[in-house]
Structures are given as structure tokens and as C-alpha cells.
Amino acid sequence: MTKNELFTEYGSYHADRRNRICHAFGIPLIVLGLLGLGALVRFGPVDLAIVAGIAVVAYYATLDVPGSLLALGIFALLYFVGLHLTWPASLAAFVIGWVFQLVGHRFEGTKPKFLENLVYLLVGPLYIFEEGAHAMMRRKPVAR
């Protein structure tokens, strides 16, 4: 599937504003938690978070190069934060992120899209990161 097809399908399960807000908080928390926990699993000088992050960004690059670069930047920031978290804090971020997700889908009245196809676990972060970037670019400058 193309990025547009994936985003159209994903977006159809995330039309409610409250659900999108929950996802805007929940998905970064989930990614933070995963990167923090993954950083604890080392293979010599490399950790699992780096390996997983590279794999996900490589997948994103097959869909959309600018989006993959955006995700790379956000993953790098979240990875840096995750390096400074204890494992209980990383686990808490992961769990709290999923609570946001489930509450959002309760508002929406839909099941999470990944229950139909696991690829949407990867599509979600790219969708939310791009949606956030587009929202920030549309904002008018604050008047002084």
C-alpha cells in the first residue's frame, strides 16, 4: 500500500478530534517508552532501540522520504530522552501512552486499526508526526 492509502485508512479510524488529541500524546509516549526500554538491551556498542529505530525509519523511507526524515528527528529526540529514563519510567510512558490510545478509541467508538493489520502499529507514529508538523506549519505567528 502507498502512504496515501495507509493514511486514508488510518485516518478513517481517527476522525474524532478527541481521539486525535489522545493519539498526539499517546503515540509519542509509547515510542518514548519503547526506545527507553530498547536502549537497555545492548548488542555490544549498539542497543535494540537503535536497531528498531533504523528499521522503522527505513520502512518509512519506502513510503515517504520527507516523512522518514521527520520521524528520524523525532525518534532521535525521544531516544535521547529515553536514555535518561529508568526502566520503570520507560515502562510507565509505554503504559500511559496505551491508556491514551484506548481512551481515544473509546471517544471515537472504533477499535484500534492495528487489530486488523499490524502494519498500522508502524503507520501510527508517522501519521501523528506528520499531522503535528502540518499543524505547526499552519499556525499564525503570535502577535506582539
Image: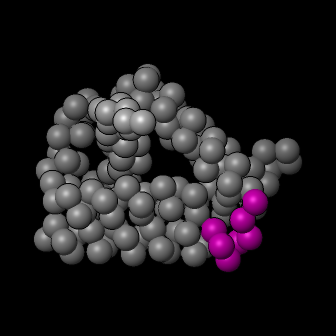
Along the line of sight, which residue is nearer the eye, 54 or 82?
82
Q: What colouring method underlies this structural image? A: one colour
Which residue in the rendered view is the most extreme toward the top? 65
Residue 58 coordinates in the image, percent (x, y):
51, 31
Quarter occupied by the C terminus:
top left
Quarter of the image where one finds residue 111: bottom left
Which residue in the rendered view is the most extreme toward the front? 144
Residue 19 coordinates in the image, percent (x, y):
24, 63
The residue drawn where x is 37% and y is 70% is: 100
Quarter occupied by the N terminus:
top left
Q: Is residue 43 left or right of residue 70?
A: right
Which residue in the rendered view is the most extreme toward the right? 44
Residue 66 coordinates in the image, percent (x, y):
43, 23
Quarter of the image where one finds residue 109: bottom left
Q: Is residue 140 above or below residue 13?
A: above
Along the line of sight, which residue is nearer the eye, 38 or 26?
26
State which region is magenta.
84-90
Number of marks drawn: 0
Q: Is residue 130 visible?
A: no
The residue drawn where x is 52% and y is 68% is: 94
Quarter of the image where one finds residue 112: bottom left
Q: Is residue 105 left or right of residue 140?
A: left
The residue drawn where x is 37% and y is 36% is: 143
Residue 69 sits inside the magenta stretch: no
The residue drawn where x is 74% and y is 50% is: 47
Q: Is residue 40 visible?
A: yes
Along the line of sight, which residue is nearer the eye, 71 or 56?
71
Residue 117 coordinates in the image, percent (x, y):
27, 54
Residue 85 sits inside the magenta stretch: yes
Q: Is residue 10 left or right of residue 73?
A: left
